[in-house]
Amino acid sequence: MPVSPAVELSNVWVFFEEKAVLSDVSLTLESGGTLALLGVTGTGKSVLLKVILGLIKPDAGEVWVEGHNLTPLADADLAPYRRRMGMVFQEGALFDSLSVFENVAFPLREQGMRDEAAIEQRVREVLGFVEMEHAIDKMPSELSGGMRRRVAIARATVSQPCLMLYDSPTAGLDPVTSHTINVLLAKLRDLNSVTTLFVTHRLQDAFTLANYVYSPETRDLVPAGSDGVGRAPVHCRFLVLRDGKVYFQGTSLELARSEDLYLRKFIA
Ligand SMILES: Nc1ncnc2c1ncn2[C@@H]1O[C@H](COP(=O)(O)OP(=O)(O)OP(=O)(O)O)[C@@H](O)[C@H]1O
Ligand SMILES: [Mg+2]
């Protein structure tokens, strides 16, 4: 049986006050694949992620996740699908009044998990994965920007989603910290086969995730194909939104080689 794509949008339109913020957007993201979503500010990248999550309903078109059409579903019926997706919002969006532990435990409690020992075990496990277990009792205000981003990623992955949506995960971070976040995205993708969709303003981040894989030996990124795991080439697509429309869709090489003036300016 053919495997359904992780995400499929067909001819999606979203209007805010009669202005089209997404115009006829279609895309397919294969299970286990990576999609880098690029575009200047205000082009609809965050809106697109919220459409996939079901937080914004398209005015026309359809949203399919793992072969299920989410478009006609009411909020209550979306819950099982949302659980399959983890979202890291643009600003990390931790609950300031909750400790790191309670932030990460939040989705588990919301899903009705009551076994405190099991909750703690799972929270420690994901915090260990993002190398933040030492901060389990801290408050978000005590953390640096990069640490907060890690905790947000832990919280988004605590329910073991098979699709992760990251909205500008490296925005506002220095290059070294940005690299550690990229390593984390690749680690989740390459060790846990998590389908990955991320928004970025930094083309460099997108090229990195398209051409490098996580190596458990070095605990860092290595060029795809050199890790002996045979995961190369990384199945990564690039999508450039412009004024709510899909302006470009293709591979990193196609983008890098494009003669299109707008894209050239964009990637310069
Ligand atoms: N809830 C909303 N109500 C009305 N307009 C909205 C809403 N959310 C977004 N918009 C508008 O939709 C357009 C796209 O916004 P969006 O947040 O998706 O941009 P973006 O590409 O994520 O930008 P950035 O790179 O700055 O994050 C903008 O013009 C924005 O003002
Ligand atoms: Mg945005």
Image (cartoon, rainbow, N blue to C red):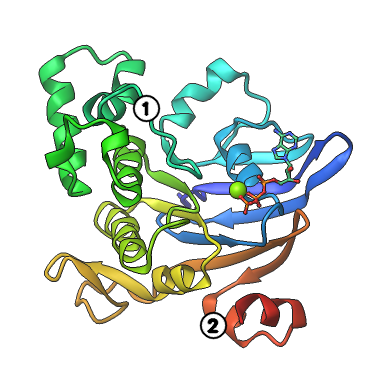
Of residues 40 and 253, the one drawn nearer to the viewer in this rendering: 40
Residue at horizontal 63%, vertical 51%? 45
Q: CA distance from mark 2 to mark 1?
A: 41 Å
Which of the image's four quarters has the C terminus? Answer: bottom right
Residue 124 position in % (x across, y down)? 14, 35
Residue under the image location 56 percent in, 63 percent down: 201
Residue flagged by tag 2: what amino acid is it? Leu
The amino acid type, in three-letter code, at marker 1 is Asp
Could you say where residue 72 lies in the image, as x and y percent from the top left?
A: 68, 26
Q: Which image quadrant for residue 222?
A: bottom left
User: With respect to residue 56, does 224 lie above or below?
Assistant: below
Residue 53 versus residue 189 in the image, above or below: above
Q: Is mark 1 within 8 Å of ligand 2?
A: no
- Which numbered dot is residue 96? 1
Q: Of helix, strand and loop, which one carries label 1?
A: loop
State the mark number for residue 253. Answer: 2
Most extreme residue toward the front is 142
What number is the disc on residue 181?
Answer: none
> Quick one: label 2 or label 1, which is nearer the N terminus?
1
Numbered disc in front, either 2 or 1:
1
Q: Secondary structure at mark 2?
A: helix
Q: 57 left or right of 173?
A: right
Crowd around label 1: few <14 · some 14–19 · many ≥20 (10 Å): few
Give percent across and percent down for residue 189: 33, 56
Choose between 161 and 175: the one closer to the eye: 175
For image coordinates 44% across by 59% down, the residue present is 33
Crowding at dot 2, Cα within 10 Å, few <14 / some 14-19 / many 20+, comes out as few
Evaluate if marks 2 and 1 touch, with contact meaning CB atoms under 8 Å apart. Answer: no
> Is residue 83 rendered to the left or right of residue 68?
left
